[in-house]
Image (tube, rainbow, N blue to C red):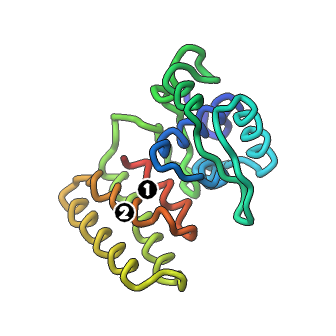
């Protein structure tokens, strides 16, 4: 059964934890609203705050509030929970659960998070669109040094060369994510890019 427009709160909690789990080794906080922004209908800031507080009360995440909004990172207890259980499917590890997500601004497209059955053609088109958006943001970001812009451009060029051969280069994407990790203007795009790992 596919749910196109609405996820239950338990699924949203699992989704947030699963996304934070992906970044567990980065030791950095991730903007919560960017994570929920992956969903077509998204989540209001109020709802996001309530869910973050619940997960923090359970000691699954740590949160901070900054001028950029609410950010969180997963704790050791949260990692353990993701590997053993979930809110939506009791006894089933979050990291094994798949959720249907509507892609923002694409009314006829659905992806299944962490699916091994991937339509490579549409994925390459989506990945190219994300890369275009990253290049646009990087071009106008006046805080970035030219050297970093050149490194990002070269990395994207290398990824695109692989895409021409219908290959999604996971190492190239990881390298690009590393280059983008400290650039706030592309935070949401980086999260979308991480879906291809």
Task: Find residue 102 and report its horizontal and vertical position in percent.
Answer: 56, 45
Q: Residues within 10 Å of mark 2 (few under 14, many from 20)?
A: many
Q: Residue at x 40, y 66 (%)?
A: 179
Q: Secondary structure at mark 2?
A: helix
User: Where does the N terminus fall, quadrant-wise?
Assistant: top right
When the figure is inspected, residue 165 is found, relative to residue 23, above or below; the finding is below
- Residue 197 x %, y %: 36, 47
Q: Quadrant of residue 15?
A: top right
- Distance between the Cα atoms at labels 1 and 2? 9 Å
Which residue is found at the position 50% from the left and 54% from the top?
191
Q: Residue at x 35, y 55 (%)?
A: 174
Q: Which mark is residue 176?
A: 2
| Image location (x, y in percent) of residue 58 | 71, 28
Q: Earlier along the polypeptide chain: callout 1 or callout 2? A: 2
Q: Nearer the viewer, residue 17 or 43?
A: 17
Badge 1 density bin: few <14, some 14–19, many ≥20, Cα 10 Å: many
- Where, by quadrant of the figure, is residue 114 drawn? top left
> What's the mark number on residue 114?
none
Q: Where residue 193 is drawn, which disc sits there?
A: 1
Which residue: 73% across, 61% down? 66
Q: Position of residue 175 (x, y in %)?
A: 33, 60
Image height of 24 relative to 55, above or below:
below
Q: Is 163 left, or right, of 181 in this rendering?
A: left
103 above or below 152?
above
Looking at the image, which is closer to me, 101 or 59?
59
135 horizontally vs 27: left or right: left
At mark 1, the secondary structure is helix
């Amino acid at each position: 059964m596919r749910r196109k427009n609405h996820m239950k709160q338990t699924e949203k909690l699992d989704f947030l934890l699963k996304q934070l789990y992906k970044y567990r080794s980065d030791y950095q906080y991730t903007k919560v609203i960017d994570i929920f922004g992956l969903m077509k209908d998204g989540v209001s800031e109020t709802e996001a705050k309530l869910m973050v507080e619940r997960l923090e009360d359970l000691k699954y995440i740590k949160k901070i509030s900054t001028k950029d909004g609410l950010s969180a990172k997963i704790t050791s207890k949260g990692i353990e929970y993701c590997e053993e259980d979930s809110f939506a499917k009791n006894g089933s590890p979050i990291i094994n659960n798949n959720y249907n997500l509507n892609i923002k601004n694409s009314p006829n497209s659905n992806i299944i998070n962490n699916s091994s059955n991937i339509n490579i053609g549409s994925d390459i088109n989506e990945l190219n669109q994300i890369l275009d958006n990253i290049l646009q943001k990087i071009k106008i970001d006046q805080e970035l040094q030219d050297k970093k812009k050149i490194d990002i451009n070269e990395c994207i060029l290398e990824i695109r060369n692989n895409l021409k051969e219908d290959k999604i280069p996971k190492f190239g994407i990881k390298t690009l994510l590393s280059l983008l990790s400290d650039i706030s203007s592309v935070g949401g795009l980086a999260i979308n890019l991480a879906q291809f790992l």
